Image (cartoon, grey):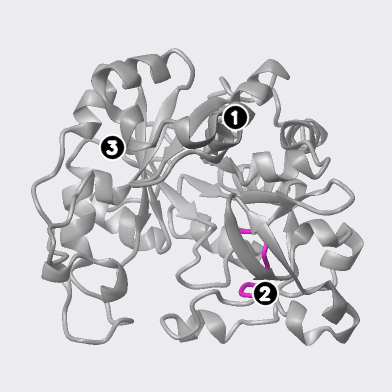
C-alpha cells in the first residue's frame, strides 16, 4: 500500500478527536490526524456577517463559554431551527469578531471529564482555519488527509439571508479547496455532506469539485423537503428503497448513515443482525459512510456494555468491527485511534 492510499474503511475524526478534546478545536483536529485519521469533519454554520464558522450547531450554549460573557447576555433567545424550538445563543446573532472572543467547551462533560479539563483553552474556528490545518498536516506528514465538510441547517440560514451554498463556496475558494475533488495528491480530496440535498446541488452548480455525500437519519424527514412539500415530504427511510437508492446515485456520490440503520437494535436495545443497506447502496453505485462510533456504554447496544457506568468503555471493538464488516467505505469516530485499531491497526494514509 502506498503512503497516499488509505486503508479501508476510511477513519474520519468526528469533529476532530472529539472524544479527547473539545470538539471543533485545533487541538481536536490535530490530535485526530496524529491518531491516524484519514480525514476530519468540520460542521459549518454561519455568523451574522456571513462567515462560515465551525460548530456542530448554531445554538452554542453547550459548546462554548458564551453564557459566561455578560456582554452577550441579551443575545439569549428562543428560535425555531428545522422545526425545533431551541433556547440559547445562536451564531447568526453574532459577528465573527464577537464569536472569536469565545472559547470552546466539552459538550459531554459528565461522560468525558478529561476532555472537559481543556474547557476554555481553545478559541472557535472558521472553515478556512480548518482547511489550513488540513493543508499543514498534509505538508508535514505527506499523507493524503482531507476534510469532510458538513453544511448544517442550510434551509434555516437561507431563510435568514445567509445563503449557505454561497458562503461555503466562498470559504472553499478562499482556501483553494473548491477544485480539489478529484485530486489524489498529498492534499487529498474534498468531501461535502449535508442532511439536505438541496444545498449539495447548489454547491455542485457553483462548480465546487467534491464528492457529495447525503446524510441519512434513522427517522424523520429532510428539512429542505419539509420546507418545500410540508407533510407530503418524503422521509429518510423512504429514500433507502432500491429504487430511491438508484435515484440518489444519479444525484450524489454517496450516503452517510446513522449506524442504527446498519446495526439495528431490538426493542430491548440489543444489537441484531447487520442489515443489507450497505450492500444495496453499493449495488446502486453509492459510497457508504456511517456515524458515529463511540466506545462509551452510553452509545453502545445494551448487549455490548460493560458495567453500569455510562462513561465506561464497553465492547467497542465488537461494535466497530461488526459495522466495518458490513463493507462501509468510511466511519466517523470520536476516538480515531480506536477506530484505526478496530480497522486492523496501522496509521491512516497507509503509513
Element assignment for label 3? loop
Residue at x-position 41% and y-position 81%: 111
Q: CA distance from mark 1 to mark 2?
A: 30 Å
Q: Identify whether 332 is placed above or below 187.
A: below
Q: Nearer the viewer, residue 106 or 140?
A: 106
Label 3 belongs to which residue?
328
Residue 293, given in percent of the width and then of the height, sits at: 33, 58
**Residue situated furthest front in the rendering:** 231
Residue at x-position 69% and y-position 45%: 156
Q: Magenta includes 108?
A: no
Residue at x-position 50% and y-position 83%: 109
Label 2 belongs to which residue?
61
Callout 3 crowding tier (Cα within 10 Å): few <14, some 14–19, many ≥20: many
Magenta stretch, residue numbers:
57-63
Q: Quadrant of the N terminus?
A: top left
Q: CA distance from mark 2 to mark 3?
A: 34 Å
Residue 252, given in percent of the width and then of the height, sits at: 48, 21
Label 1 belongs to which residue?
228
Amino acid at each position: 500500500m502506498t503512503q497516499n492510499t488509505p486503508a479501508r474503511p476510511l477513519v474520519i475524526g468526528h469533529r476532530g478527536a472529539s472524544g479527547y478534546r473539545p470538539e471543533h478545536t485545533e487541538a481536536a483536529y490535530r490530535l485526530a490526524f496524529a491518531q491516524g485519521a484519514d480525514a476530519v469533519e468540520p460542521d459549518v454554520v454561519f455568523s451574522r456577517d456571513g462567515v462560515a464558522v465551525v460548530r456542530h450547531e448554531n445554538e452554542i450554549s453547550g459548546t462554548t463559554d458564551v453564557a459566561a460573557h455578560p456582554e452577550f447576555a441579551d443575545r439569549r433567545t428562543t428560535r425555531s431551527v428545522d422545526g425545533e424550538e431551541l433556547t440559547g445563543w445562536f451564531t447568526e446573532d453574532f459577528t465573527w469578531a464577537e464569536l472569536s472572543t469565545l472559547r470552546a467547551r466539552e459538550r459531554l462533560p459528565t461522560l468525558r471529564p478529561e476532555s472537559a479539563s481543556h474547557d476554555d483553552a481553545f478559541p472557535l474556528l472558521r472553515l478556512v482555519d480548518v482547511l489550513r490545518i488540513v493543508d499543514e498536516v498534509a505538508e508535514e506528514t505527506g499523507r493524503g488527509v482531507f476534510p469532510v465538510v458538513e453544511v448544517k441547517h442550510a434551509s434555516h440560514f437561507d431563510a435568514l439571508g445567509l445563503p449557505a451554498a454561497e458562503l461555503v463556496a466562498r470559504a472553499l475558494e478562499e482556501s483553494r479547496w473548491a477544485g480539489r475533488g478529484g485530486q489524489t495528491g498529498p492534499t487529498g480530496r474534498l468531501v461535502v455532506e449535508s442532511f439536505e440535498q438541496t444545498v449539495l446541488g447548489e454547491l455542485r452548480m457553483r462548480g465546487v469539485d467534491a464528492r457529495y455525500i447525503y446524510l441519512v437519519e434513522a427517522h424523520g424527514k429532510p428539512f429542505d423537503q419539509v420546507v418545500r412539500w410540508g407533510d407530503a415530504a418524503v422521509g429518510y427511510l423512504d429514500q433507502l428503497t432500491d429504487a430511491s437508492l438508484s435515484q440518489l446515485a444519479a444525484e450524489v456520490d454517496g450516503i452517510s448513515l446513522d449506524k442504527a440503520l446498519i446495526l439495528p437494535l431490538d426493542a430491548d436495545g440489543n444489537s441484531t443482525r447487520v442489515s443489507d443497506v450497505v450492500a444495496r447502496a453499493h449495488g446502486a453505485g453509492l459510497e457508504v459512510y456511517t456515524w458515529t462510533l463511540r466506545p462509551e456504554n452510553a452509545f453502545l447496544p445494551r448487549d455490548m456494555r460493560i458495567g453500569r457506568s455510562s462513561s465506561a468503555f464497553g465492547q467497542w471493538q465488537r461494535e466497530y468491527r461488526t459495522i466495518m464488516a458490513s463493507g462501509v467505505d468510511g466511519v466517523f469516530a470520536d476516538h480515531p485511534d480506536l477506530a484505526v485499531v478496530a480497522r486492523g491497526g496501522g496509521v491512516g494514509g497507509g503509513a
